[in-house]
Amino acid sequence: MEYIYAALLLHRLQQPITEENVKKVIAAAGVTPNEVKVKALVAALSEINIDEAIKNATLTPIAAPSAAPAAPTQAPAAAPAKEEKKEEEEKKGEEEALAGLAALFG
């Protein structure tokens, strides 16, 4: 991602997007430039009109949260299953306790 940012910064400053310039920007950010990534980026951008790409870029708008979130509608369906398991565990525990008491008096 930092390589794309470097290219955009160079473009914004009206500097040529060359391997040397990209390396300088990356190094100035405190990162050791990766030669392969720099070469690939410069080669890929050589065929692209960056101004046109930015103009045609579409952003996905972030939807406002709805009044009724979807999660609570799913929760009631899951809640009875949890309650049933709890009840079954309690019954088993009571039965074991009763069996233990019966063994003491039997």
Image (cartoon, rainbow, N blue to C red):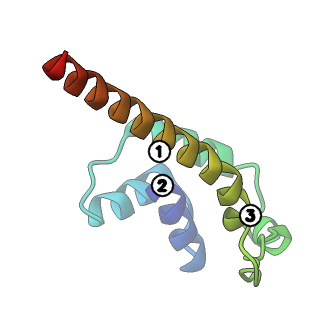
**55 sits to left or right of 3:** right
Q: What is the three-letter code of the residue carrying label 2?
A: Tyr
Q: Specify the label residue 3 is tagged with.
A: 2
Residue 13 x, y percent position in the rendering: 54, 80
Distance, label 1 to label 3, CA atoms, is 49 Å
Q: Which residue sits at x=52%, y=38%?
A: 85
Q: Which residue is mark 1?
A: 38
Closer-to-camera residue (30/21): 30
Considering every residue shown, the one lying at the far left of the view is: 104
Q: Are marks 1 and 2 in contact (CB under 8 Å)?
A: yes
Q: Earlier in the sequence, mark 1 or mark 3?
A: 1
Q: Are marks 1 and 3 in contact (CB under 8 Å)?
A: no
Q: Is residue 84 above or below residue 51?
A: above
Q: What is the three-letter code of the residue carrying label 3?
A: Thr
Q: Which residue sits at x=55%, y=48%?
A: 83
Distance, label 2 to label 3, CA atoms, is 44 Å
Q: Which residue is mark 3?
A: 73
Residue 74 x, y percent position in the rendering: 71, 57
Decide: few, some or many residues near mark 3? Use Cα within 10 Å; few <14, some 14-19, many ≥20. Answer: few
Q: Secondary structure at mark 2?
A: helix
Disc number lying in front (1 or 3): 3
Residue 70 x, y percent position in the rendering: 74, 66
